[in-house]
């Protein structure tokens, strides 16, 4: 009678031992995550309650004063507006175009291998090199104005990066150039996992490429579409400050000032570290909310 009970007890002890060993092996990763992810995140919230002008300068606790000042700052709301415009233009253009381009690559047209390499190339170019390329294209004497002058469209020439009406559009153009090809290659990798027989059956039923792409392929990779949308949302929201710094420095007249660049500008150029981290908290909340909404909308439905 005791045999089965002994076996059950031994099984439980072995399971407990396995769990303990798993926890031991996972401990370094947990410590690393707490120290270098959660720790800095908590530091952002703490620093946002300080009046702090320089790294080596003393700080003063001011509570929520930085947040009150932030919500009353017209530059903050301008940065919020510019970030919203960036996201509202880049994401609806980039993701559908990348998906269609990825579908085209998956169909293996002539030269698809060279096209795949060509599309992935922008991801291999450093940010500084990328900025220099677009500076050469968009400067007053750059390639774009030269083309307009050559075809007689002199009225269309403008200093694209120094014109407050076109500077943000130029930044958006850089974002699209940088992201469409890379995202298309990722879509292609996912679409290649779809069973070819499904597409062949749809083709035999008379479905054209457009219908096969959006009524068959898209529903099957919808969750992956959401993942890439989430990644590009995070990149545009948090990572576009480098492009702005190198091309426009937030100008002209704050025309390209967005939230991520405002954090940099306040912390490193204006010596307002506490205020910059208040903006950083707002940026974190917006980013987290956006990620959760995207994940909820695109979560897998079975």
Image (cartoon, rainbow, N blue to C red):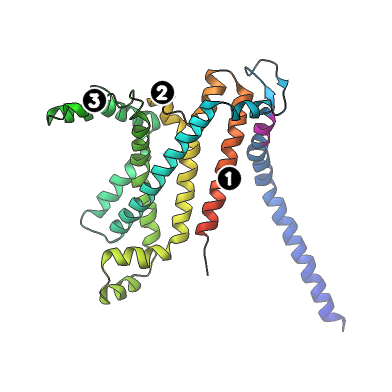
Quarter of the image for residue 205 reads bottom left
Q: In this view, does 270 lie to the left or right of 196?
A: right
Q: Where is residue 269 in the image (x, y as percent from the top left)?
A: 52, 18
Q: Give the range drawn in magenta.
A: 42-46
Residue 25 is inside the magenta segment? no
The residue tagged 2 is 251
Q: Nearer the viewer, residue 47 or 293?
A: 293
Q: Residue at image x 52%, y 66%?
A: 301
Q: Name the disc covering residue 142, or none.
A: 3
Tell me the SS state at disc 1: helix
Comes first in the chain, label 1 or label 3: 3
**Label 3 Cα neighbours within 10 Å, binned few <14 / some 14-19 / many ≥20:** some
121 or 295, which lies in front?
295
Say which label, 3 or 2, has the lower sequence index: 3
Queried whether the magenta region covers residue 43, the answer comes back as yes
10 Å crowding of disc 1: few (<14), some (14-19), many (20+):
few
- Cα separation, mark 1 vs mark 2, equals 27 Å
Query: What residue sits right under mark 1 in the picture?
Result: 288
């Amino acid at each position: 009678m005791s045999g089965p009970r002994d076996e059950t007890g031994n099984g439980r002890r072995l399971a407990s031992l396995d769990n303990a060993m798993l926890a031991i092996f996972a401990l370094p990763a947990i410590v690393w995550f707490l120290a270098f992810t959660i720790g800095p995140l908590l530091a952002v919230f703490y620093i946002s309650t300080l009046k702090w002008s320089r790294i080596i300068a003393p700080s003063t606790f001011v509570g929520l004063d930085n947040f009150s000042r932030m919500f009353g700052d017209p530059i903050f709301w301008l940065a919020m507006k510019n970030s919203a415009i960036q996201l509202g233009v880049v994401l609806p253009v980039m993701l559908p175009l990348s998906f269609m381009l990825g579908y085209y690559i998956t169909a293996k047209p002539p030269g698809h291998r060279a096209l795949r390499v060509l599309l992935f190339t922008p991801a291999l170019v450093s940010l500084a090199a990328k900025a220099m390329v677009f500076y050469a294209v968009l400067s007053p004497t750059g390639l774009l104005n030269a083309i307009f002058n050559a075809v007689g469209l002199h009225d269309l020439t403008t200093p694209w990066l120094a014109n407050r009406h076109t500077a943000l559009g130029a930044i958006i153009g850089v974002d699209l150039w940088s992201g469409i090809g890379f995202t298309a290659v990722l879509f292609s990798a996912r679409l290649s996992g779809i069973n070819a027989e499904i597409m062949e059956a749809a083709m035999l039923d008379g479905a054209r490429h457009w219908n096969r792409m959006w009524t068959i392929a898209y529903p099957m990779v919808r969750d992956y579409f959401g993942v890439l949308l989430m990644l590009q949302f995070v990149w545009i929201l948090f990572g576009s400050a480098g492009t702005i710094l190198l091309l426009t420095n937030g100008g002209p007249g704050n025309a390209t000032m967005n939230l991520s660049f405002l954090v940099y500008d306040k912390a490193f150029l204006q010596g307002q570290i506490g205020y910059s981290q208040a903006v950083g908290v707002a940026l974190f909340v917006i980013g987290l909310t956006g990620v959760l909404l995207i994940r909820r909308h695109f979560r897998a439905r079975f």
